[in-house]
Amino acid sequence: MGIANRDDANKYYAQVSDLVEQYMQKGNIRPSRLGTYMRPDGENFTFFLKAHGLSEVNGINTVLKDVIEDLVAMEDDGVMTFESFKLMESDEFKITDAKKCLYVGINVAGLSHEKALADEFDTSLGHIESIDPDAHDFRIDDWNGEATAVIYSEEEVEIILENFIDYSFGKAQEMAIEPIPGVKIDLDGMLSENRFVGSMSQKLKREGAFLDILAKMVGKKVHVNKKLSGGKWFIFVG
């Protein structure tokens, strides 16, 4: 099954465009964030196609990439209706709660997460119990007794990091400074988003500070990151 002619291409482009629009509306995701949440051939990208029964269509990867690139460009270039622009700029499409950073753009935990935990704790899948798949929270019954853990893939941690930076930029815009007594200056409109994002991203990644922040956000104390079943994983144990 594949795209053999122009009619096939038009059909799949229309179908994928509708599905991506539903994805954005359901997750309150701006078009500009699609490049982060569905990186070409990444976990979410592949999961999206499988979830909609499209993964076996030859050429569908190119269709999805094109749809994402077009939507990102439309927002960057301002080629949107006034109503759409207002919606994307509304609080509904912004991360206004730090806890939401753990969920926006993140799929529920599944078998791959369980296999990685079984690998890390040297136990069988039968001893891995999902407590909250949305929160990636598990209970493990291993040789040393019972433990709880939150697990994310490398791609998921990168998405959460970018969510956190977006959230932090939004909070910074709400702040004000008073360089001279009685003279209050709002930072909204004065901050360069590119410089803020670049500086904060570099600082958090270089110093490894974000993993400590993430551990606190998920309510765990210890975190490990290593190559396990299916790739690199980050595990937070309470």
Image (cartoon, rainbow, N blue to C red):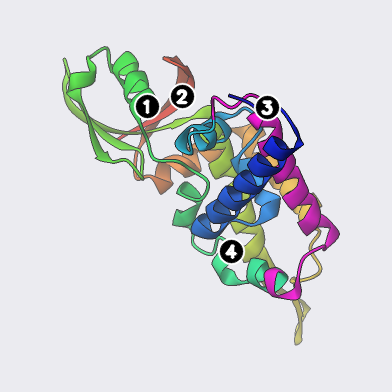
- Per the image, the residue denoted by label 2 is 233
Q: Position of residue 49 (x, y in %)?
A: 54, 34
Name the quarter where the N terminus is drawn: top right
Check disc 2 and give the amino acid type. Trp
Determine whether the residue tagged by mark 1 lies in a helix, strand or loop: helix
Q: Residue at x 43, y 15 (%)?
A: 228
In this rendering, the answer to whether 124 lies above or below 38 is above
Q: Is residue 64 left or right of residue 149?
A: right
Q: CA distance from mark 4 to mark 1?
A: 28 Å
Disc 3 residue crowd, few under 14, some 14–19, many 20+, Cα 10 Å? some
Q: Determine which quarter of the picture holds residue 40.
A: top right
Q: Nearer the viewer, residue 157 or 182?
A: 157
- Per the image, the residue denoted by label 4 is 93
Examine the structure image and report whether residue 238 is included in the region drawn in magenta.
no
Name the main secondary structure of what is drawn in magenta: helix
Q: CA distance from mark 4 to mark 3?
A: 31 Å
- Per the image, the residue denoted by label 3 is 59
Of the residues under marks 2 and 4, which one precedes in the sequence? 4
- Per the image, the residue denoted by label 1 is 113
Q: Residue at x 46, y 37 (%)?
A: 51
**Magenta region: which residues?**
55-84
Q: Nearer the viewer, mark 3 or mark 2?
A: 3
Check if mark 1's residue and mark 3's residue have beta carbons within 8 Å. no
Check disc 4 and give the amino acid type. Phe
Check if mark 1's residue and mark 2's residue have beta carbons within 8 Å. yes
Residue 202 seen: no
Of the residues under marks 4 and 1, which one precedes in the sequence? 4
Q: Nearer the viewer, residue 172 or 53?
A: 53
Determine whether the residue tagged by mark 3 lies in a helix, strand or loop: loop
Q: Determine which quarter of the picture holds residue 54.
A: top right
Determine whether the residue tagged by mark 2 lies in a helix, strand or loop: strand
Q: Is residue 150 left or right of residue 155?
A: left
